[in-house]
Image (cartoon, rainbow, N blue to C red):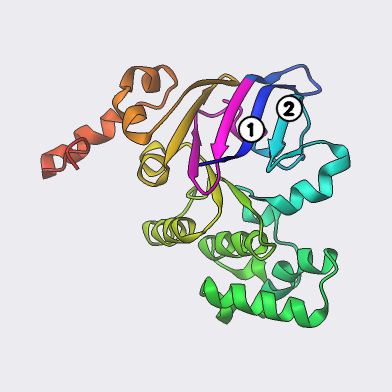
Amino acid sequence: MENVIEISNLDYSYPDGHRALSGINLEIKKGEIFGIIGPTGAGKSTLLQHLNGLLLGNGEIIIDNLRVEKKNEKAIREKVGIVFQNPDDQLFCPTVFEDIAFGLYNMGFTSREVEEKVTAILEKMNLSRLRELSSHHLSFGEKKRVALATTLVMNPQVIALDEPFANLDYGNIMTVIDMIRQLPITRIIISQDILLALSICNRIALLDKGKIITVAQPEVIAANTHILKNAGLDYTPYLQLIRPWGFDFHKN
């Protein structure tokens, strides 16, 4: 399987001097669900924002054979869509329809094309009933799905989701997981919820203090409780809570 993203020797420091990323080398394959986990402050969101040029550090990032740099900004952002942790950062128009249509109009689609594309994504994501409502009057779960729709309607090759499960109830988490699994594109998921990341991703990178500690399949990551504990991501206490009911994570 070919690589769609290649990151080489990426470093990034914020204006205050804080070094957020150091020596990042990473390859993400076309069509996979790739997870990036790590504790708060590990540099996960900073790395995410480098994937479509929102931030530009030292090093090299190649997306589908195109280098991420200022002159390629428009083309890169057409290839890579980002869904932020807080949907209110992406929803600012009077209605759900207009929020989803906004990017399409900016790309020069005609009103008829916009109508067709937005209607299709609303139906696909079971959001049609929200079409004329204000995004800011929706539940948090509905906002998350609308924010996802604003990105998917642009038909990106890669979608990167920052904490897509945060602050959602069980039903909405399952809805988002199903949507992510069904997407026929490369999916990158940043999450502090290690158990959810383990359940959905093909491969996972563990990030801590701005450095990649390891990249492996979920079962390998889950079994290496030592490195998870060192990164503050020990999930074993949760297992102690559920084992009295006969559930064993490692056997299932």
Tell me if residue 52 is in the magenta stretch: no
* Helix, strand or loop status at disc 2: strand
- Left or right? Give the position of 199 relative to 20: left
What is the spatial separation of the Cα atoms under label 1 and label 2, in whole angstroms? 8 Å
**Circle 1/circle 2 CB separation < 8 Å:** yes
Q: Which residue in the rendered view is the most extreme toward the front?
A: 1
Q: Which residues are magenta?
A: 24-46
Numbered circle sitting on residue 60: 2
Relative height, residue 185 to residue 72 (above, below) = below
Q: Residue at x 74, y 70 (%)?
A: 101
**Residue 165 rendering spot, x and y as whole percentages:** 47, 50
- Left or right? Give the position of 92 relative to 203: right
- Left or right? Give the position of 155 relative to 217: right
The part of the image, by quadrant, that contains residue 63 is top right
Going by the numbered disc 2, the residue's amino acid type is Glu
- Front-most of 116 and 94? 116
Relative height, residue 84 to residue 146 (above, below) = above
Q: Residue at x 42, y 60 (%)?
A: 178
Going by the numbered disc 1, the residue's amino acid type is Glu
**Residue 234 rendering spot, x and y as whole percentages:** 35, 26
Numbered circle sitting on residue 162: none
Q: Residue at x 37, y 20 (%)?
A: 229
* Helix, strand or loop status at disc 1: strand
Numbered circle sitting on residue 6: 1
Of marks 1 and 2, which one's residue comes earlier in the chain? 1
